[in-house]
Amino acid sequence: MIVLTGGAGFIGSCFLRKLNDEGLDDIIVVDHLNDSEKWHNLSGKKFRDYIQKDDFLNMVLEHKLPTPKAIVHMGACSSTTLTDADYYLKNNYGYSKTLAEWALSKKVPFLYASSAATYGDGENGYSDNEEGLIGLKPLNLYGYSKHLFDLWALNNSLLDKVTGLKFFNVFGPNEYHKESMMSVVCKAFPRLRDEGRISLFKSYKNKYKDGEQKRDFIYVKDAIEVMYYFFCNPSKTGIFNLGTGQSRSWNDLANAMFSALDKKPVIDYVEMPETLREKYQYFTEADMDKLRQAGCDLAFLSLEDSIKDYVGYLDKKKHL
């Protein structure tokens, strides 16, 4: 039995598809569906059971679950705009600690999602060297909640027993339910298709022209291949960046979308909400040396090829 939290979410459901494709279906999916359209991500996939996240946590605390073969913990609140710190700390930090302690007590592999949001404005770089964790300063509560768990694992000498993946800007099929937290590709597609235009945030730093802010974009199909590598190699422990190692501008991303739809680029640069301006990452780029040294030598699709593939899903909201 495999436990997959966040299994109905964006990355989690894509990883569920990967497990199914590899012939694995003895899976407990843990999530919180509420009134979203997230349930569509489970349609057509195979798993043993679905358990609501709070019910699952109670079952863990009450010792009502059999020992799993592995725990893949993708479940978290990934919003970067909520302001309820207690919720983030309970849902992202406390929940993760409980699951990690359960995994360690059962001596089963624990693979979890961290985030590039832990790097903050990048003043300390983007190295996943664990000695540098203490100096990181996240810009939002989401990043801080993820950072706290990384620090907890470090401070309790657990990074040789668990594996964390710092996801950079992931985009791709199955993110349709994320509303304001959808990738720009997903969010901008309908207007670009129908009106031939796209909106990007203006820059508020002289170092970056409008649209030239840069991120490390990674296609979800590539991300889940890296996840599966670590799933199959549980002895590879520690914290690892999961990006491509190449930053690209938002203008690059927009132009790739126009190219995929065979349209002439028309970009509108709009004001960034003031609530985001102090929390906005102008540049991210994953240092991938540690991942490669761990033996994961997978080749990633280019931004252009990733978007061309994704466009094939977007028009009909096709799922992976």
Image (cartoon, helix red, strand yellow):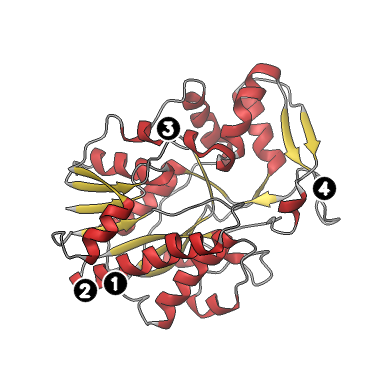
The residue most toward the right is 206
Residue 22 appears in view: yes
> In the structure shown, which secondary structural element does the residue marked by tag 3 occupy?
loop
Give the mark nearer the N terminus: 1 vs 3: 3
Numbered label attached to residue 37: 3
Which residue, given by chain and number where applicable, does mark 2 sit on? 105
Callout 1 touching callout 2 (CB < 8 Å): yes
Image quadrant holding the C terminus, namely top left
Q: What residue type is labelled 3?
A: Glu
How far separated are the C-alphas under marks 4 and 3? 37 Å
| Left or right: 76 as drawn, with respect to 276 | left
Residue at 76 percent across and 45 percent down: it is: 272
Residue at 23 percent across and 62 percent down: it is: 60
How far separated are the C-alphas under marks 4 and 1? 46 Å
The image shows residue 10, relative to residue 199, as above or below, that is below
Q: Mark 2: few, some, or many residues within 10 Å (few <14, many ≥20)?
A: few
Callout 2 touching callout 4 (CB < 8 Å): no
Please state which of the two labelled residues, at mark 4 or mark 1, is closer to the viewer: 1
Q: In which quarter of the image is residue 260?
A: top right
Q: What residue type is labelled 2?
A: Ser
How many marks the image carries: the answer is 4
Which residue, given by chain and number where applicable, does mark 4 sit on? 209
Residue 236 appears in view: no
Give the mark nearer the N terminus: 2 vs 4: 2
How far separated are the C-alphas under marks 2 and 4? 51 Å
Numbered label attached to residue 101: 1
Q: Mark 4: few, some, or many residues within 10 Å (few <14, many ≥20)?
A: few
Image location (x, y in percent) of residue 102: 25, 69
Please state which of the two labelled residues, at mark 4 or mark 3, is closer to the viewer: 3
The image shows residue 47, relative to residue 288, as above or below, that is above
Residue at 72 percent across and 25 percent down: it is: 197
Give the mark nearer the N terminus: 3 vs 2: 3
